[in-house]
Amino acid sequence: MKELILIIVGSALVNNIILSQFQGLCPFLGVSKKVDTSIGMGAAVIFVITLASIATNLVYSLVLVPLHLEYLQTIAFILVIAALVQFVEMFLKKSMPSLYSALGVFLPLITTNCAVLGSALTNVQKGYNFIFSVANGFGTAVGFTVAIVLLASIRESIEDNDIPYNFQGSPIVLITSGLMAIAFMGFSGLI
């Protein structure tokens, strides 16, 4: 149990997929304008990464390893992730059309989001069993959600501030993200 908690906290805070590994920056920067949209994207990413960790672990251990096709792991993982994202996209379009339209082009981009693939490949590289893979995937997704919601809340709070012209828009977002990454580096001393 202690190992599971360490994996979840470690992947969410210490090895945050966004702020430590710099994977998945496209939706992080693009969807983080409003907290509501960021929470929706975070929920979609939690769902996709957790299910992708389950599915890719099963595909790897039950299909690729017995058939000695480990070299096909990246292609197999991309196919599994693409199918999961299509499922999420259809679900959101049917049940939550406002969130679906708010996420826009960034929802299909989860398919090519390197955070999802990176989490699946990390599970294989670290030799995690099924339970540890799911815990790592969930922790990674929670870390993504924490980072994107934090950035969105900061962006909303500085929206009306008097920011110098040269720093308005993307520059202030990148500076804020850099400061958040520095702050998250402090977690590496805790575990």
Image: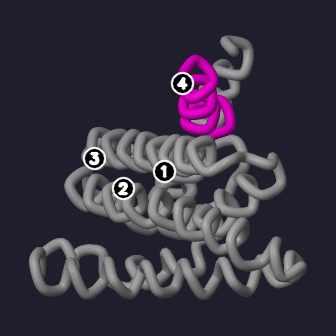
Label 2: state its secondary structure: helix
Label 4: state its secondary structure: helix
Distance in Å between CA atoms under marks 3 and 4: 32 Å
Please report the residue visible at 72 percent of the width from the left and 70 percent of the height from the top: 60
| Residue 61 x/y as whole percent | 72, 66
Which of disc 3 and disc 1 is earlier in sequence? 1
Query: Horizontal placement of 106 versus 65: left or right?
Result: left
- At label 3, the amino acid type is Glu
Question: Who is closer to the viewer here, 47 or 180?
Answer: 47
- At label 2, the amino acid type is Gly
Category of crowding for the residue at label 1, using alpha-carbon neighbours closer than 10 angstroms: few (below 14), some (14–19), many (at least 20):
many
Distance in Å between CA atoms under marks 3 and 2: 17 Å
- At label 4, the amino acid type is Ile
Category of crowding for the residue at label 2, using alpha-carbon neighbours closer than 10 angstroms: few (below 14), some (14–19), many (at least 20):
many
Distance in Å between CA atoms under marks 4 and 2: 20 Å
Please report the residue visible at 12 percent of the width from the left and 85 percent of the height from the top: 94
**In this figure, which residue is indicated by the disc labeled 2?**
42
Residue 48, numbered circle: none
Distance in Å between CA atoms under marks 1 and 3: 22 Å
Please report the residue visible at 53 percent of the width from the left and 61 percent of the height from the top: 54
